[in-house]
Amino acid sequence: MTVIMLIYALVLFALAGYLLAHRQQGFLTLKQVPEKLGKTLFNYALLLLIAGLLAVVAAFVPNPWLQIGALILGALGGGLLGVSLPKFLNM
């Protein structure tokens, strides 16, 4: 379970890094990112970073509730990001 949680944390960190790196330009099909979308991307990146840190802690602490919390937080962050993006891309 340790390896799985660490891989999950790496995926969350990679996604958060992408969101942080593309807050101002070059996000998906947008050359210039609107300010509101940039703030939204930052908020989701922060949520994913927190979930990634929780996943790293959960990898080494044998507490199933901590592992479940990391999985749920990351899934909610990624899912809500996916749901909220279409309204910005259709501008």
Image: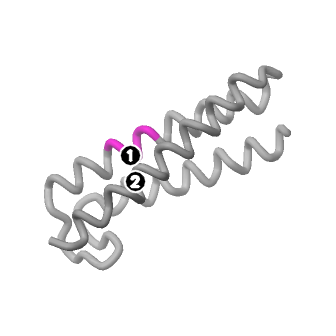
Do the CB atoms of the residues marked 1 and 2 lie less than 8 Å apart?
A: yes
- The answer to whether 46 is drawn above or below residue 68 in the figure is below
**Relative horizontal placement of residue 71, taking residue 41 as reference (left or right):** right
Q: Position of residue 42 (x, y in %)?
A: 31, 46
Q: Residue at x 15, y 62 (%)?
A: 34
Residue under the point 58% across and 39% down:
52
> What residue range appears in magenta?
43-47
x and y, in percent, of residue 63 in the image: 78, 20
Count neighbours of disc 2 (C-alpha within 10 A) and say few if under 14, some if 14 to 19, many if 20 or more.
Answer: some
On the picture, is 55 further left or further right than 37? right
Q: CA distance from mark 1 to mark 2?
A: 7 Å
Q: Earlier in the sequence, mark 1 or mark 2?
A: 1
Q: Nearer the viewer, mark 1 or mark 2?
A: 2
Report the number of discs. 2
Q: Which residue is mark 1?
A: 44
Q: Which structural element holds mark 1? A: helix
Quarter placement of the C terminus: bottom left
Q: In the image, which disc is placed on residue 81? A: 2
- Name the magenta segment's main secondary structure: helix
Task: Answer few, some or many: residues within 10 Å of disc 1's Cα (few below 14, many 20 plus, some between 14 and 19).
Answer: many
Residue that appears at 50% across and 34% down: 50
Q: Nearer the viewer, residue 8 or 82?
A: 82
Colour setting:
one colour
Q: Amino acid at mark 2?
A: Leu
Q: Is residue 5 left or right of residue 82?
A: right
